Image (cartoon, helix red, strand yellow):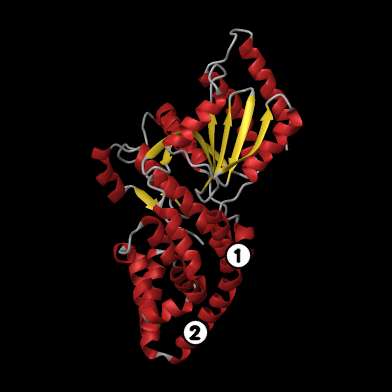
Amino acid sequence: MSLVAIEKYYQEVDKNLLFAETINEQRIRNCFWNLLKVYAQKFQYEIVAEVFIDGTKGKKVRSDGIINNSYRHTIGLWESKNTKDNLDDEIRKKIENGSPTENILFENSEIAVLFQNFSEVARVKIREKKKLDKLLTQFVSFKSEEVKSFEAAIEKFKIEVPSIIKNLRKKIVEARETNKKFLDAHKIFFEICKIEINPHITLDDIREMMIQHILTEEIFKRIFGDSDFHKQNTIAYEVEKLISVLFSREDRKNLLLNIEPYYNKINETAAAVQDHHEKQKLLKVVYENFYRVYNPNAADKFGVVYTPNEIVKFMVEATNILLLQHFSKTLADRNVEILDPATGTGTFICEIIDSAIPKHQLEQKFKNEIFANEVS
């Protein structure tokens, strides 16, 4: 997959060897980390170092690194060992301690050993370049049954959603013409949206808002575990009232029956993600996937691809630095108004609240000087 990257890895190791007869574990890890990152990035995977995971003995175990896909599923584990230790002994200790062996790579800068589906499947000398390339490719290409099941649910979602959307559009258009109770509620909601969102909003915009809400409500609820979201958010509350005039909960459940496996898989994935920022990353990927299925033309036209958290963090920090440099103020100061006119899932606003505004200043800021809206 990347013989050039392997050669660069050899050079890094050799440089370290100039200063010591053996390389300590930390130096080995840094060298191999850079190599593994190249292979992971081919699949747009992320490597996370020094993490605790669920072990096979009912307790958490530490791994030198894990590879995650964009949906926060673990693709594989990586363990880096010292050359002065017996690698097989270290492997045995890790397995006995509970390290999962569904897809795990052990290496010590001399030997690489790959376990998949709970058995050793490959062992190569690190300096055998082509064999190492094959082993690393096999490692990052692995998909567990969980990942395969999730991908199957996504494919089913892509197939089923267009017909669900078509059915919903038809029902809403018919109701606007024949259902007086819905028509009255629709007029009220239309006026609210013109005031709160955009005075030029159209009837078709309202229809699409209803459809998006019906399709994505379960996604938000399952990722954040918040069943009362639609009661706390003003627009969500009003659109929920409008939808409930037309569809009962049973109607909605039946409409979404064919994509229920997709929601279930999101639920399973979200349950394993505890960190709020990781949940945000998951939400962005899931929502981007949804929107590309829901409206592929608009996704291409408007570039509905969400900004990576690392770039969001940099932009917020850079803005704060520039504010201080040129205006002697920060984002947290009074009379510094923050506007996010294309807020999407709120990543920028969330980062500002989390990292740029001290807790004692947040209430004033949140009530008076933060504005976020979505133009699409």
State the residue at coordinates (54%, 34%). 78
Q: Point out the residue furthest to the left here.
A: 360
State the residue at coordinates (53%, 46%). 307
Q: CA distance from mark 2 to mark 1?
A: 25 Å
State left or right for residue 367 relative to residue 74. left
- Image height check: is 41 above or below 147? above
State left or right for residue 298 relative to residue 100. right
Looking at the image, can residue 343 be seen?
Answer: no
Residue type of the residue flagged with mark 2: Lys
Q: Do tag 2 and tag 1 residues touch (Cβ < 8 Å)? A: no
Image-quadrant location for residue 175: bottom left
Q: Which residue is mark 1?
A: 155
Q: Which residue is mark 2?
A: 171
N-term mark: 2 or 1? 1
Q: Position of residue 244 (x, y in %)?
A: 36, 79
State the residue at coordinates (64%, 46%). 141
Residue type of the residue flagged with mark 1: Glu
Q: Position of residue 346 (x, y in %)?
A: 43, 51
- Quadrant showing the N terminus: top right
Looking at the image, can residue 149 be seen?
Answer: yes
State the residue at coordinates (56%, 67%). 157
- Image height check: is 30 above or below 341? above
Residue nearest the viewer, comparing 369 with 101? 101
Residue nearest the viewer, comparing 350 with 256? 256
Q: Position of residue 305 (x, y in %)?
A: 57, 52
Q: Point out the residue furthest to the bottom here.
A: 178
Name the secondary structure under disc 2.
helix
Residue nearest the viewer, comparing 116 with 166? 116
Disc sitting over residue 24 in the figure: none
Name the secondary structure under disc 1.
helix
Q: Position of residue 154 (x, y in %)?
A: 57, 62
